[in-house]
Image (tube, helix red, strand yellow):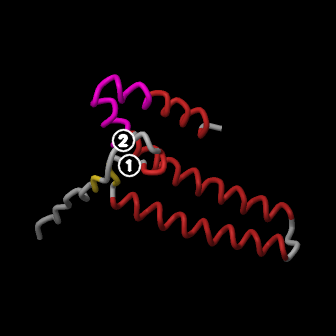
Amino acid sequence: MTPKRTTPAPVIECGCALPADEASRKAVAVDPDAKARNGKRLRRIEGQVRGLQKMVEEDRYCADIMTQISSVHEALRSVGRELMRNHLKHCATAAIKAGPKQAEPMYDELVNLLYTHSR
């Protein structure tokens, strides 16, 4: 039996990383597998948060609630890491390759992202 050859998932091109209008900003590219994983994680997190609401309403033990909050935090950090990887791989790379005019704002954005999300 020959080994099954896997081909990498196509990367979806979807716009410019840094247009003037922030409301219309789109990722330069999005890995469809990463997008699906993040969607699945976020739906799971949504369920965890609903569970937290129910625990609070039912006056559950505080330590148990806090443990679940920690789980939600870690799940969100996981989504953030995946998004950061995609941002670096596609958006930041494209801006830096485009030259100093696009690279400088991207450097500032990356520094701010790293500072904000490393807490």
Vertical comparison of 102 with 57: above or below: above
Please name the predominant secondary structure of the magenta segment in the image: helix
Compare marks 2 and 1 and give the one earlier in the sequence. 1
Quadrant in which the C terminus is drawn:
top right
Q: Which residues are magenta?
A: 89-106
> Residue at 85% of width from left, 71% of height from top?
60
- Residue 27: image tag: 1
Give the residue drawn at x 86%, y 63%: 62
Tell me the amino acid under the disc marked 1: Ala
- The residue furthest left is 2
* Res. 113 mark: none
Q: Vertically, is 115 above or below 54?
A: above
Q: Where in the figure is residue 1, as x and y percent of width and height? A: 11, 70
Q: Secondary structure at mark 2?
A: helix
Viewer-nearest residue: 46 or 14: 14
Percent position (x, y) of residue 63? 83, 60
Q: Residues within 10 Å of mark 1 (few under 14, many from 20)?
A: some
Left-right relation of 47 to 62: left
Q: Which residue is mark 2?
A: 91
Kind of residue indicated by mark 2: Cys
Q: CB under 8 Å between callouts 2 and 1? A: yes
